Amino acid sequence: IVSECEYGQVVRDIALAEKYGARYHVCHISAKESIEAVRNAKAKGSFVTCEVTPHHIALCDMDITEDHGRFKMNPPIRSAEDRDALVAGLVDGTIDCIATDHAPHSAEEKSKGLSGSMNGIVGLETAFPILYTNLVESGLVPVETLIRAMSINPRKIFGLPGGSLEVGEIADITVLGLVFSASALIATPIARLCSA
């Protein structure tokens, strides 16, 4: 599935949204050209937002080392250049949200290689540890940017309730994990806790 299938549609939809004053949100952005189209639209003041998935921001096609269905998703994993553009888009605010695109399948459904397996990947349970390890621990993205993209920005964009710890508000919180040390409490990604 070539990148043009994605960014051609994104460019067309942005033009329509601008022409008619509509809001436009791009789901599962994966191509560098799509990022550039969204960046340009935002620079003009258009109400365009977008999201990326953990697997598109953490993997590239060079990570596909075997013909296995676990690598089959839609949109597909793209080049390292595309992945790097996604990270840059998250850092500069072009990408507003991270969505898990949680689409699990049975082992049988994913055992038919890249051509015969179902599209989809587990994302809900693994999103934060994957992103924390690949983006925050590597120094590419501050943890505050990750939190904004995973929780604060989606609420704002879609007008969802909650998002604050105040009396009378919905207490919609996630506990990621804490490790006690003699000097302080240190936030630790779930993956590190599980491997300890």
Image: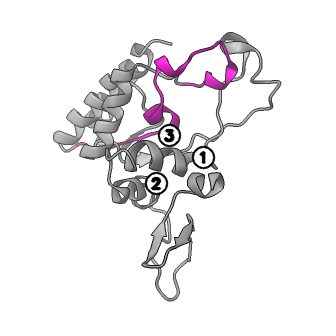
Residue located beneath label 2 in the image: 150
Q: Report the magenta residues as a range.
A: 46-74
* Left or right: 192 as drawn, with respect to 93: right
Query: Looking at this rendering, what residue extends furthest in the left direction?
Result: 44
Read off the residue under disc 1: 126
Residue farthest toward the right in the current orientation of the protein: 108
Is residue 169 placed above or below 91 in the rendered structure?
Answer: below
Query: Residue at 43% of width from left, 35% of height from top?
Result: 57
Q: Which residue is mark 3?
A: 54
Question: CA–CA distance between discs 1 and 3?
Answer: 9 Å
Q: Secondary structure at mark 3?
A: helix
Mark 1 and mark 3 residues within 8 Å of each other at the beta carbon: yes
Residue farthest to the bottom?
167
Residue 149, position in %: x, y?
40, 52
| Amino acid beneath label 3 | Pro
Report how far apart the C-alphas of labels 1 and 2 lie in the structure.
13 Å
Residue 58: % across, % down? 46, 35
Q: Say whether residue 186 is left or right of residue 45.
A: right
Q: Which mark is residue 168?
A: none
The residue carrying pointer 3 sits among few (fewer than 14), some (14 to 19) or many (20 or more) residues within 10 Å by Cα, namely many
> Which badge, 3 or 2, comes first in the chain's sequence?
3
Left or right? Give the position of 170 relative to 9.
right
Q: Distance from label 3 to label 2 (Cα)?
A: 10 Å
